[in-house]
Image (cartoon, rainbow, N blue to C red):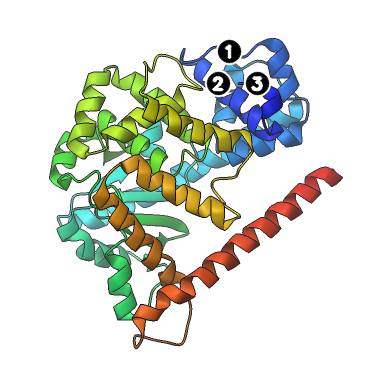
Amino acid sequence: MHRETWDSSSYAAFVWARAMLSTRGLADLPTRSEWLSVNEKPEVTLMGLRRNRIAQAGGCLLSELPAISNEIASALRREARKSTIEALNQARIAARVQSSLSSSNIPCIFLKGIFQTLQMQCDLGFRGSIDLDILVAPEHFKESIECLQAEGAILNNQRVDPALSRKTSQINHAISLSLDGVAIDLHQRLDPDPNLMNISFFDLFGAGCKVQVDQMEFITLSLQDTCVLVASHGCRDNWRDFRSMIDFSILYNLVGSSAIVESRTLDLGVLRRIEIARAVTAELSSGLGSFDKRSMVFSYWTWRRHRKGKDLNNPRKISEFLTTFLYWILSAGDMGSLKFGIRRLIWLPSGTASSGLGGRFVILYPLLAPVKVIQRLWTRKRDAAVAAMDIERR
């Protein structure tokens, strides 16, 4: 990819991502001139790394990467230390959650976050994580919420309108809680779309593996299931940052067999998404094979947005929001997913729309939701403009 076609901060993050993968033998190390040029402006480099959620990884890998300025190195070390402290705190909360659920004979699986980091054989602070993701069987979902509340967890965004709550619960697979300052997402299935990743919890639990954090033991998904989950979530989220691509590249390599991964994607109904994941990640990583034209179209779509420096974690325009939605639906390649996606687009924002309607006119909530969405997008755009001005002043 030619540098002149890139946003400068995105290109810096791209070069850093390749350098990080080179420490695992999964990419070529950038040339010395390329490395020096992308690190000339520390504020630009750090902005790109943070936007792509790989600043913590950079801090963990400093000793294995080419030399950089003290300003960048110090900032990344701070990010890695902070991430490690947060990871240990999350592990302590996870132990409390596991104990509470176990006392009620409710098995659980810890997803992503620090548990995935350990599966990837990385330092604890490598990925960074803002919440705990926990999967329970659908039949244990309500009881699990009660157990966590008894432990002191607080439900976030409680809806006082039962009719609206019933509508939104049909298209949402998780509920958010907070326990001693740590956010928890409690899931009853792996994907919001019931047509995807639809497999028995107990099959996943039986195939799961154990990881240890600070002498505490937890069950997480098997290595191949984690790899498939990262691929599916990457497509759902438009491959919005380089961290998800690094995750997939490392996990795919650790599984060691494309046949095992592809067989599992057939079980989970996301074969198209694993093909897209391979095509997208191949721009960073080697050894991912060849791809069909359809997957290459998605790869082009993803990288075109990254080259332009789009912050896909915080879309600022309605067109960006709708493009992300379209990518998610088309990457599933299923009519059932299209129908579900439309329902989710209508009802999920409705849950955040405030009104005085109560439960009397639930059908009117979708009409109010766009106001809330536009307000949120405008706020993000304003905050981004202020941040850009601050960087220019410095």
Looking at the image, which is closer to me, 173 or 374? 374
Quadrant of the frame with the N terminus: top right
Left or right placement of residue 87 versus residue 190 in this view: right
Taking the spot 50% from the left edge, 30% from the top edge, the residue there is: 300
Residue occupied by mark 1: 29
Residue 129, how many percent across, how many down?
47, 44
Contact flag, marks 1 and 2 (Cβ < 8 Å): yes
Residue 236, how many percent across, how many down?
39, 44
Looking at the image, which is closer to me, 130 or 172? 172
Looking at the image, which is closer to me, 102 or 73? 73
Q: Residue farthest to the right?
A: 393
Q: Amino acid at mark 2?
A: Arg
Q: Amino acid at mark 3?
A: His
Kind of element beneath mark 2: helix
> Picture quarter containing residue 256?
top left
Quadrant of the frame with the C terminus: top right
